[in-house]
Image (cartoon, rainbow, N blue to C red):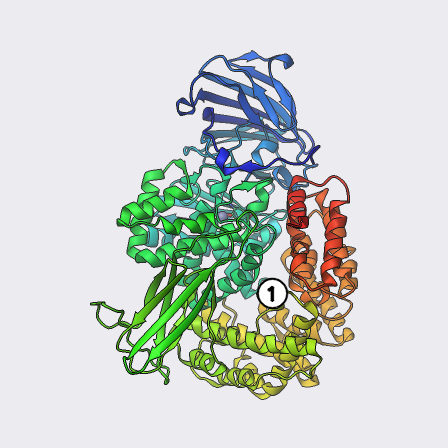
């Protein structure tokens, strides 16, 4: 908590560090309420930072300072200044050793930043600015130092871990022991980690491409040790993939992963000692869904990939966060695409981007991929930095091709190995390795907002000439009223009336016959001419979502059905299904407001029927094509959000489709409801996905037969995917008693398993049935619920506010006020989680009158509740601003 309004940090104010830290020696004596931390830093004036000897500034928050000594001489309190955010120490020599001793309270630390306790296990989270909650230090990513850490603990904490290699262990007095770890790679403090507890491990080995043997270990609480196999297999696959695709091998002799129950985020890439949220590493077929298996595979890979994109080459300052995060998300997405279905992975990522990142880009916290200011950096671990940042890297990949991109990444890693780099360095390496110029492309890093492409076309049958005209624009965002044109790769092709790919010849081109091109859009308005086009073509635009933009083109329903059936780009086949559904839902929303009886477009019904009947399609793709755009997606696309109309339209469309396609859905369900032994592999996941999509539709009808299928599946299921899908179908649709009994038996069976209990909580919070808010309030009183456990908070409150559009948007505003009250309570315990949870309320300006005022009032009640954390203050104050 703070005393005054938090200040703003600007990118333009970046200065090199005044002092460098060549080595950092840490010594911890672990005690729940009084852990002693001693540090010994070899400090040196940074020759590049200028003349003279300015005072040494160290960051420190919530620390009890015990002593400071310079070159062995203790400093008196009058020799330096100590304030809320750190120390300032006068300096009279260019090189010195600084020794600091301080005390911290891990047990009292509910922020889960710095050193804290989770189920009796000590662990750390230092990114971005958590190390300053451990000891006084220049806590900034451009200060790289070689760390040695000694951990002293009672013997009932047998496992003591830190970064790098174990170099010494031994006993201290009768009942304590110690282990010393040395990390040979210089790193910033945010990559430091410490773990101590009563843990078990599974161990494996990996031989790198140069023949070195690496020990792989995963540590968990004993009760979870049987849930590590999938993470271990994923780790080995990721290590091999990074060698094959990027030529990067692992650099230490040991790689450790630890699973922790109380964790603010998914995981953390600390050098040689990744720390994971239990939910992102532990899985068994009986307890984890297919989605969880896939999430674990990609997060294990993500954290592993950071060893190069983040650790060997780190960030100069936190404005460069996307340098490591955008690049690493791109790397993990490509890895997952190679391990599973590429098209399905792309569809999942793009759906999320379009729904949540586009909404962020249009909201009060909108910022560029490289932000230029922040109050609290934790608030900038956003979908824009991660997901849009990954799209920006993907566009470079598209523009340069795989070989060109690899030349660029090789140069980037070679040039910047062992140092702290910028987004500019990344682009420069891509340019230099390929002899290209990406000047205009850089605007993707500095301009916020989602560009819009308005596309029109003209076919001249006599000349056999086709002209595509593209106009780009980008809406204003906070602090950026006007935008310059972006450099946009637009991948496209043309279809003939029978769905065949038409050959593309660009005006004046000497290339041979091709049927797909990447058009490079650089102007506000630009035309592209294609010659020798034998018939009126149908354009397939932005294939594979080649840029994070919105494409406006007036397709007719018949054209969309042709694309759905025949486009060679699987992503665009899905995208056509979404456009078709979107048009139908927009019509329903308008009719609802006009008081006209709702009627669903028969084009949509027949398109869905064709998809169900077409043979040889990937079942996962079929499932995606049969899934209507979510309420959240419809809300993002709307000029003004009319929650009531969206809910009514979606409910009506779902019911109509379920009734009209009942027989086809039932046939699909029956065909796929075989009992193969469970394997979390792409083909089987695809079949379960389609089967459970069909089941959910069937249950929408609330017919007895359909609900009986769900009940039977619930009873018979031997894996969590099928069991939870059946339970969800019952909870979302069935009468109270039947659902209640299933929920009870499920809880009794799984109450000892934290991951399943989270799933159980989330299922109930997401039910669109009336009375869910009451159920959510009751869940918060359930013995399984803890406000200090972010996974529980996300399962109950996060799910309710973000995934239960129907009940969260109750017209009386009860959902909004409920959320505001929880945010206020959480802010006192865990500001990062509070600031994230408040997000749905920050979009109040986009809502129709009624909900708008209710949301605004809820947000104001947060602001008026007293002293807010810097995290929550930044989000709430920026969202309340009316310009
Ligand atoms: C996959 O990025 C994609 C994103 C920071 C914490 C993990 O490795 C990380 C950490 C946040 C939000 C999302 C992710 C992470 C963090 C994440 C994890 C896996 N450096 Br905050
Ligand atoms: Zn990351």
Q: Is residue 115 above or below residue 644?
A: above
Where residue 714 appears, as percent x and y from the top left, is 65, 74
Instruction: Decide which of 516, 554 is in the foreground and name it.
Output: 554
Please say if 95 is above or below 201.
Answer: above
> Which quadrant holds the N terminus?
top right
Q: Is residue 634 left or right of residue 392?
A: right
Give residue 83's quadrant in the image: top right
* Secondary element at tag 1: loop
Percent x, y of residue 856: 72, 54
Between 802 and 782, the one nearer to me in the picture: 802
Q: Is mark 1 within 8 Å of ligand 1?
A: no
211 vs 109: above or below: below
| Residue name at image x 55 percent, y 39 percent | 128
- Image height of 102 relative to 669, above or below: above
Q: Which residue is labeled 1 in the image?
A: 639
The x, y position of residue 104, in whole percent, is: 65, 30
The residue at 60%/49% (across/down) is 222
Residue at the spot 60% in from the left edge and 75% down from the top edge: 586
Look at 37% across and 45% down and name the residue there. Answer: 426
Q: Nearer the viewer, residue 810 or 80?
A: 810
Q: Is residue 274 left or right of residue 117?
A: left
- Whether residue 699 appears in this view of the structure is no
């Amino acid at each position: 908590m703070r005393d005054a309004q938090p200040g703003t940090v600007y990118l333009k104010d970046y200065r090199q560090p005044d002092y460098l830290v060549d080595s950092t020696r840490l010594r911890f004596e672990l005690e729940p309420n009084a852990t002693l931390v001693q540090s010994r830093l070899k400090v040196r004036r940074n020759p590049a930072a200028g003349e003279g000897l300015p005072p040494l500034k160290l960051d420190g928050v919530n620390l009890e300072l015990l002593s400071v000594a310079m070159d062995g001489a203790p400093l008196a309190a009058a020799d330096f200044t100590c304030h809320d955010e750190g120390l300032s120490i006068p300096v009279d020599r260019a090189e010195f050793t600084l020794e600091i001793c301080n005390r911290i309270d891990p047990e009292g630390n509910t922020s889960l930043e710095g050193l804290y306790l989770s189920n009796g296990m000590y662990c750390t989270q230092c990114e971005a600015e958590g190390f300053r909650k451990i000891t006084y230090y220049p806590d900034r990513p451009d200060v790289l130092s070689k760390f040695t850490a000694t951990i002293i603990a009672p013997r009932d904490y047998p496992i003591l871990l830190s970064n790098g290699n174990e170099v010494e262990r031994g006993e201290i007095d009768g009942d304590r022991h110690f282990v010393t770890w040395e990390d040979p790679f210089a790193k910033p403090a945010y990559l430091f980690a410490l773990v101590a507890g009563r843990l078990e491990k599974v161990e494996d080995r990996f031989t790198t491409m140069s023949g070195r043997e690496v020990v792989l270990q995963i540590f968990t609480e004993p009760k979870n040790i049987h849930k590590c196999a999938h993470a271990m297999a994923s780790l080995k696959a990721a290590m091999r993939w990074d060698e094959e695709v990027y030529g990067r091998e692992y650099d230490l002799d040991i790689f450790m992963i630890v699973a922790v129950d109380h964790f603010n985020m998914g995981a953390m890439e600390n050098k040689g000692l990744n720390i994971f949220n239990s939910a992102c590493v532990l899985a068994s077929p009986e307890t984890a869904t297919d989605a969880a298996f896939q999430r674990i595979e990609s997060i294990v890979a993500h954290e592993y990939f950071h060893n190069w994109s983040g650790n060997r080459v780190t960030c100069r300052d936190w404005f460069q966060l996307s340098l490591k995060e955008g690049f690493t998300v791109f790397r993990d997405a490509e890895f997952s695409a190679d391990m599973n279905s590429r098209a399905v992975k792309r569809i999942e990522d793009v759906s999320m981007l379009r729904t949540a990142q586009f909404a962020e880009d249009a909201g009060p916290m909108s910022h560029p991929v490289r932000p230029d200011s922040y109050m609290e950096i934790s608030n900038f671990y956003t979908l824009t930095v991660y997901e849009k940042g990954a799209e920006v890297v993907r566009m470079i990949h598209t523009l340069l091709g795989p070989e060109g991109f690899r030349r660029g990444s090789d140069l980037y890693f070679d040039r910047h190995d062992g140092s702290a780099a910028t987004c500019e360095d990344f682009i420069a390496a891509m340019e230099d390795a390929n002899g290209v110029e990406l000047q205009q492309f850089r605007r993707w890093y500095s301009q916020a907002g989602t560009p819009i492409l308005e596309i029109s076309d003209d076919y001249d049958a006599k000349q056999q000439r086709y002209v595509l005209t593209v106009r780009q624009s980008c809406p204003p965002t906070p602090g950026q009223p006007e935008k310059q044109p972006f450099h946009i790769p637009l991948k496209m092709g043309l279809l003939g009336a029978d769905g065949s790919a038409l050959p593309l010849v660009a005006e004046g081109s000497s290339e041979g016959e091709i049927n797909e091109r990447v058009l490079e859009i650089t102007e506000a308005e630009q035309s592209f001419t294609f010659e020798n086009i034998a018939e009126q073509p149908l354009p397939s635009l932005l294939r594979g979502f080649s840029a994070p933009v919105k494409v406006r083109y007036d397709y007719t329903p018949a054209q969309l059905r042709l694309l759905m059936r025949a486009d060679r780009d699987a992503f665009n086949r899905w995208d056509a299904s979404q456009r078709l559904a979107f048009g139908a839902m927009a019509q329903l929303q308008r009719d609802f407001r006009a008081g006209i009886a709702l009627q669903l477009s028969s084009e949509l019904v027949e398109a869905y029927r064709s998809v169900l009947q077409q043979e040889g399609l990937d079942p996962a793709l079929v499932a995606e094509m049969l899934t209507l755009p979510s309420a959240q997606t419809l809300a993002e696309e709307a000029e003004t959000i009319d929650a009531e109309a969206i809910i009514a339209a979606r409910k009506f469309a779902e019911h109509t489709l379920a009734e009209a396609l009942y027989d086809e859905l039932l046939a699909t369900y029956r065909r796929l409801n075989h009992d193969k032994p469970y394997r979390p592999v792409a083909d089987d996941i695809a079949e379960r996905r389609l089967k459970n999509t069909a089941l959910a539709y069937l249950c929408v009808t609330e017919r007895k037969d359909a609900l009986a299928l769900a009940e039977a599946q619930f009873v018979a299921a031997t894996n969590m995917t099928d069991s939870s899908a059946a339970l969800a179908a019952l909870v979302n649709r069935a009468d109270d008693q039947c659902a209640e009994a299933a929920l009870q038996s499920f809880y009794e069976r799984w109450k000892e398993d934290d991951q399943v209990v989270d799933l159980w909580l989330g299922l109930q919070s997401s039910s669109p049935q009336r009375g869910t808010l009451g159920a959510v309030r009751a869940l918060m009183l359930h013995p399984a619920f803890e406000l200090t456990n972010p996974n529980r908070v996300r399962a109950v409150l996060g799910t309710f506010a973000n995934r239960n559009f129907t009940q969260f948007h109750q017209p009386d505003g009860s959902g909004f006020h409920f959320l505001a009250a929880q945010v206020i309570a959480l802010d006192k315990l865990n500001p990062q989680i509070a600031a994230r949870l408040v997000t749905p309320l920050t979009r109040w300006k986009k809502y129709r009158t009624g909900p708008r005022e209710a949301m605004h009032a809820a947000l104001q009640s947060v602001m008026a509740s007293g002293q807010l954390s810097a995290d929550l203050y930044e989000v709430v104050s920026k969202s309340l601003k009316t310009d």
